[in-house]
Each structure stands twice: as C-alpha cells, then as structure tokens.
Amino acid sequence: MTGSVPRPPRLGLTRADLDALPNYVPGRSPADLARELGLTEAIKLASNEVPFGPLPGVVEAVTEAVTGVHRYPDMGVVALRDALAERYGVPAERIATGCGSVALAEHLVRATCLPGDEMVYSWRSFEAYPIIAATSGASSVRVPNTAAHGHDLSAMAAAITDRTRLVIVCNPNNPTGTSVRKAELDAFLDAVPQDVLVVIDEAYREFVTDRQVPDGLTYLDRPNVVVLRTLSKAWGLAGLRIGFLVAHPEVAAAVRKVVTPFSTSLAAQAGALAALTQADEMRRRCDVVISERERVTEALRKLLPEVPTSQANFVWLPLGDAAVAFGRACEARGVIVRPFAGDGVRVTIGTPEENDAFLAAAEAALA
Ligand SMILES: Cc1ncc(COP(=O)(O)O)c(C=O)c1O
C-alpha cells in the first residue's frame, strides 16, 4: 500500500519468548495406549482425577441445564457463589469462580502483575505456574524445593523483592504431595509484606489428613491471602472446568473484572450446584482415596524408601534421571503415570484394582 509506514522486520506472527515456554503436558490418552498395546483398556493415573465417576445427581443436573444452552449462563454466577458461600461460611462477595482454578490463578496474576513484576513460587510445583507467569508478562522467581521435596518458606520469603506482587503456596504441593504446616505458614505470612498477594492453592485440600496442615480459609482475616480451590478433584468435575477462589472483597472484585466473560459455563454452574449437595458422598470417596494412598505409599516405600508423605490424591517417586524410563515401563504394562524428566514421577491414586496394577508395574520396573 502506498504511503504506509515501513515496519521493522519481525521473525514470526507470535511472541518469540513463547518458544522458551514448556507446553502444558496433559496425561496420555488411555484409549491410545490400549490400542498400541492391544489391550481392552489402559489405566490412567496421570491427571489426579478421582476415579469413581460423577457424584450422584450431577449427570441429571447437567443434562437438564444443557436444554438451555442457546442462552448465556448467569455471568454473576449468583446461585453457585451463594451455595459456596454457605458451605464455606464466607460472604459471596469474597468468592469468584472460573473455568477451573488454573484460570483463576491466571486471572490473579493478570489482576496483580504488570510486565516485569515478579511472581514467586516453589519449584518443582504445579506446571501451569511458569506458563501463567510468562503469558501474563510477569517474571517467574522459582525457589527450589527442600531436600524433602517441600516448600522452603524461609527462602521464599527471602526471595520477595520490591517487584514481587504475588507468591503462590501450593498446599499440598503438586506434584510432590508435601504440605506446609500451620507454624511455618504463620511465620511466612507474618514475613510477607502486606501489599504482596499470597495465593494458597488448595486444589487437594479434601485429601489432607494431617491436622497440622491448616485450612487456608482460616487466614482470610489477612487481606493479602487468597485461597484457590477446585471442584475438579474431590468433587469429580474435572471435565466441566470449575474452580473458585475466596479472597478479600476488593481482590475478588478485581478478579471478577478481569475474568473472561461467561467463562463459568451453564453446565459447570449446574454440575457444581448438584455436586455440592453430595458432600457426604464426596467425603466417603475421598476417604477411600486416602486409605489407598496410605496403602500405596507403604508398598512403594519398600521399593523406594524416599517416597515422601503425601497429603493429596497422588504420590511422588523421586527417581531423578530414572523417571522417564520408569514411566515407559509402567506404560508397557498398561498404566499411564506422569514422569517429570530428571526429577520424579507422580502417580494418581486410583481404584484399589488400578493401584494394584500400578504397584505390580512399579515392582517390575524397580526390581
Ligand atoms: C495445584 C493445582 N492447582 C490448580 C489446578 C487446576 O485445577 P483446575 O483448573 O482443574 O481447577 C491443579 C490441577 O491439576 C493443581 O494441581
């Protein structure tokens, strides 16, 4: 076009810094693996889902809701926020919902960090954190886990600078299953400046049995604390994509402002409302997972004594450079686990039969 301003040459259509970003790795498809191995089905223990199907009433509620999908959902998510407020004993104005808690983590970064601002988290932790930081333009500050695979909260407090806007405490930590206890979290929160948001990511809260691991909701008198929860795990709604946060009203309002419009879908709202009426059944299912977690941990420790105590619905095998080979060996026996190259392997607790199949595969791989 004549008269257009000459533009400097660029190398691609999208941001060059994205090349350095790892892809989020979803668990491998069990159907694919079963086909490859000629099995009727493979076992997926790679994505920390609870294996017992949707809670009673969820399928019916979602089926009923989808008759109205020609309409937008309630953008204020009023009924669901009210139900969450009642269950957790907090005002609805403190709650924001989103398309999974991972989306809410992203919205929190969007609501706090400008390009160059820092987000501090422990590493290794949830693999979405570095992606969220980078895509929001924030700088990731990763504080190495302790030798016991948990958060080093003193080092995390020491890593806070004038540029830090947000710190994430993943409790229990994905993928290592370790957790921080009340005394250390209290001391950490006392050390963090009041204008830095502390996000306590409690995706696995319902599986915690250690009474010294505090419920993040007990810290809400501190305005800079945000608690992130999901209905994907214990509540069995991973496929519907629904998570929520509880925060100071101003923070919750800021998140509701930056949230992608209508991203808590009609089906997610209906499914979540139905699931929340099934708290006793949710508890019963989590208790099965917890007792299996103890059984699997004990069996694994006979093969690998360093397996840390997990407070989540998965266990961590700190296998270092042997992680990928272990993952392949399990897959060869029809069990999909989640290796992190050079570091370890995360294995979700499944049904007792699935766990037995995994333990047989682990024994063969580690013998
Ligand atoms: C620690 C942690 N936080 C958040 C999430 C996100 O869960 P969702 O987006 O399904 O709510 C996960 C999922 O694996 C997780 O492990």
Image (cartoon, helix red, strand yellow):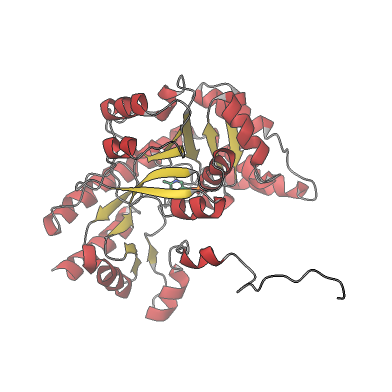
Taking depth in this image into account, of 14 and 86 the one nearest to the observer is 14
In this rendering, is residue 205 above or below 100? above
**Would residue 362 be found to the left or right of residue 10 on screen?**
left
x, y percentage for residue 81? 61, 30
x, y percentage for residue 142? 36, 49
Q: Residue furthest right?
A: 2
Taking depth in this image into account, of 229 and 277 the one nearest to the observer is 229
Residue plotted at (60% across, 26% down): 250
| The C terminus - image quarter | bottom left
Residue 172 seen in this snapshot: yes
x, y percentage for residue 293? 27, 47
Residue 294 appears in which quarter of the rendering? top left
**Would residue 86 be found to the left or right of residue 190 on screen?**
right
Q: Residue furthest top?
A: 221
**Would residue 145 be found to the left or right of residue 252 on screen?**
left
x, y percentage for residue 163? 46, 39
In this rendering, is residue 260 above or below 324? above
Taking depth in this image into account, of 6 and 243 the one nearest to the observer is 6
Q: How many marks?
A: 0
Taking depth in this image into account, of 157 and 312 the one nearest to the observer is 157
Residue 2 appears in which quarter of the rendering? bottom right
In this rendering, is residue 73 above or below 192? below
Residue plotted at (17% across, 49% down): 298
Residue 83 seen in this snapshot: no
Residue plotted at (56% across, 29% down): 84
| The N terminus - image quarter | bottom right
